[in-house]
Image (cartoon, grey):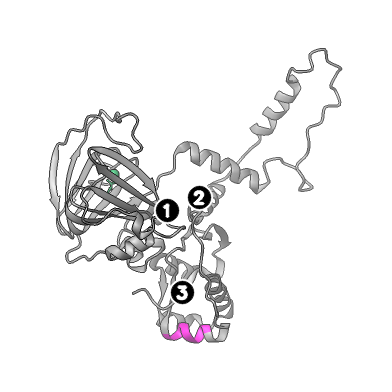
Amino acid sequence: MRRYWQKKPLLIRQAIPGIAAPLARDELFELADQDEVESRLITHFRNKWQLEHGPFAADELPSVKQRAWTLLVQGVDLHNDSARALLDRFRFVPDARLDDLMISYATDGGGVGPHFDSYDVFLLQVHGKRRWRIGAQRDLSLQPGLPLKVLQRFEADEEWLLEPGDMLYLPPHIAHDGVAEGECMTCSIGFRAPSTNELTAQFLYYLAERGETSGSRDGAAPLYRDPQQPAVSRPAQLPAALVDKVGAILAKIAWSEKDISSFLGTYLSEPKPSVVFDPPEKPLNEARFVKRAISQGVRLDRKTVLLYDNLSFYLNGEKSRLADVKNWVIELADTRCLSAKRFVTLSQQSSVTALLHEWYRAGWIQMGELR
Ligand code: SIN
Ligand code: CO
């Protein structure tokens, strides 16, 4: 992190020796056929780049015998526990920055063309071989008229052939081009970095929702009043008094550090729009749930985001006070599980078991420790 993160590329040979693809090719194709999964097909047939968005029925993908196509499946960690487990190995970076695990499948010669990304990425080879060429070029102009971002003038400074277990880290804006040599699969561990515009817009929205910006005493936001308004001959002109008054309202907007962390906690733990939790069909009652948890432990569902700060925790976009649940919530958040052994001590506190049972019924936690 000190030497490379957000600074310069790093090739790590055998970062994860003996790694296997979290999913087999056919399982990946099945995911790409689901409505709630984001997938893209990129073909480079007869020197022409084409892009299509999924879902793709099995017979809508080109034959695996055909050269030069690639299937990208986004957010595989949300749908597969092995993919989630692989993503978890990158939690040396804070969860607040972690985005998702994408898997690309390519036939010989397949790739997405030379391009750059705005976000950091770890490119982990999990099956077959891919040749990566990278360059720290300044000229980031794109080929016009293409459905995907392909650099106009790509110049590579370095080149490597990655084999299963090898990994390449790229900070934002490093040009890169990965071409499959034979059939291959690559996992992209991606990060999120909100733009200042997005943060500003979302924070102002949060402040407005918080409802304290207007300074009203009765809870209802006061309305604009203008008892001094004279009759006008230019009705379309904005009244200067209105501009003044709104200026005074805006100048009074104030926030504390607590507002900033509450905003960030709820905003960053908000599930992605496509996320739907799967509550258990026949949930155990609380007594049975506790009994099961004492023998098996519990873990966060792979889709759950749980963050915390000094005072609060943020579970899938909802803020709650840490208070007397502090110790175990922090443990659950950092390790994503509570062991069976740990649960034996917790099971004495009914407020804890009631809360965990509620989360279990919502599909936010699952029975069993992490595999
Ligand atoms: C790929 O895995 O084919 C593309 C990933 C990337 O270049 O960002
Ligand atoms: Co890229």
Q: Which residue occupies the foreground of this view, 37 or 215?
A: 37
Residue at mark 1: 96
Q: What range of the chain is rendered magenta?
A: 289-295
Please tell me the numbered disc located at residue 264: 2
Outermost residue, top direction?
233
Q: What residue type is labelled 3?
A: Gln
| CB under 8 Å between discs 1 and 2 | yes
Viewer-proximal residue among 249 and 110: 110
- Kindly state the secondary structure of the residue where label 2 is placed: helix
Confirm or deny contact between disc 3 and disc 2 (CB under 8 A).
no
The kind of secondary structure element at disc 1 is helix
Q: Which residue is drawn at 24% across and 57% down?
A: 64
Kind of residue sitting beneath label 2? Leu
Most prominent secondary structure in the magenta stretch? helix
Q: In which quarter of the image is the C terminus?
A: bottom left
Residue 292 is a magenta residue: yes
**Which residue position holds label 3?**
366
